[in-house]
Image: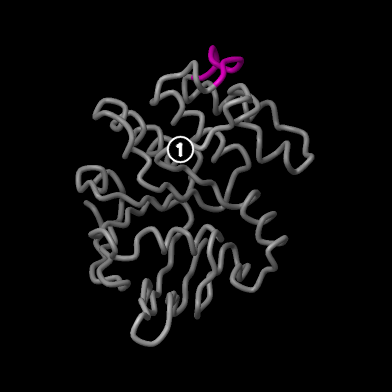
Amino acid sequence: MNILECKNLTKTYGSGSNKVIALDGVNLALEKGSFTAVVGASGSGKSTLLHMLGGVDRPTKGNIYIEDTDISTLSLEQLAVFRRRKVGLVYQFYNLIPTLNVRKNILLPILLDGQKPDEDRFEKITSALGLTDRLKHLPKELSGGQQQRVAIARSLIYQPAILLADEPTGNLDRKNSQETMELLKFSNQQYQQTILLITHDEKIALMADRILTLEDGKIIRDEVVS
C-alpha cells in the first residue's frame, strides 16, 4: 500500500533566462512502513523535494498524495493542519522551542491542535528514546544528541503518515549521528513509521532500505539496499 505518491512533480523558480528548474517531473511512490534515503549533490533538488512533500512549499505543477489526500490542492490553513497531524519533520537544527521543557516540546503538535495527549503513547516513545528523566529540562540543558531525540519524539507523537528527516545528523558528531540513525531505524521497525531521509552522507543513506539519487531535479537512480 502506497502512503505517498508524487505525479509529475515540478518546481520552477524565476522565468525566461533566469528560470531554474528545481524539480523536473518527479514520479515517486513510497509504501507504508518503508525507509527511503534521498541523496544527491548540492542543488540536485533534495531539499526542494522535501519541502514539497512536507507542504512547506507548493509545486509549480504536479500532484502530491499523502494517504489519498492531494496536498497540492489544500488551502494554506488546511495544509497547516494536515502537516501538523500527518507529517513528522526532523531537521538538522532541531527547531525546539527554547522556553518550553522537553515534555511540552514533544507534545507541541497535539497542544497546538487543542487535543488531549495519549499518555500511553507519550510514555512509550519517551522511554524508547531515553528521555524519561529529561522531560522537565529545557532544550539548552540538553546535548545535541538529546535535542535531536526530542525532535524525533515530537515528529512521532501524532502517529504521522510520513516522517521527513532533513539532514538530521548534519549537526552531530559521528557517535550521535549513529545513535540518531538507529533511533530512526527503531521507529521505522517498531512503529512501522514511513520515513524519507535527505542526506549527503553515503554511510547514513545505506542504513535505509531504498536509496533514490537526484540529479538536476530528476531521479536518476532507484536502488533497493540489500
* Camera-side residue of 58 and 84: 58
Which quarter of the picture shows residue 180?
top left
Viewer-nearest residue: 187 or 175:
175
Residue 46 location, quadrant: bottom left
- The picture quadrant where one finds residue 148 is top left
As drawn, is 123 to the left or to the right of 201?
right
Residue 199 point in image, percent of width and height: 30, 49
- Give yes or no for residue 135 being in the magenta stretch: yes
Q: Is residue 222 above or below residue 101?
A: below
> Residue 3 magenta-drawn?
no
For the point 39% across and 79% down, the residue is: 25
Q: How far across and down, in percent of the image, does residue 116 sit?
A: 77, 34
**Above-or-below relation of 188 to 34:** above
Could you tell me which residue is drawn at 39 percent across and 25 percent down? Answer: 144
Is disc 1 placed on a helix, strand or loop?
helix
* Residue drawn at the location 63% of the way across and 25% of the way down: 100
| Colour style of the rendered protein structure | one colour
Specify the segment rendered in magenta: 131-138
* Residue 116 as seen in the image, left or right of residue 17: right
The residue that disc 1 covers is 187
In this rendering, position of residue 89 left or right of residue 209: right
Q: Residue 99: give x, y in percent of width and height.
A: 62, 25
Residue 1 shows up from this direction: no
> Does residue 3 show up?
yes
Answer above or below: position of 124 versus 61: above
Mark count: 1
**In front of the other: 60 or 179:** 60
Secondary structure character of the magenta stretch overall? loop
Type of amino acid under label 1: Ser
Residue drawn at (40%, 40%) of the image: 92
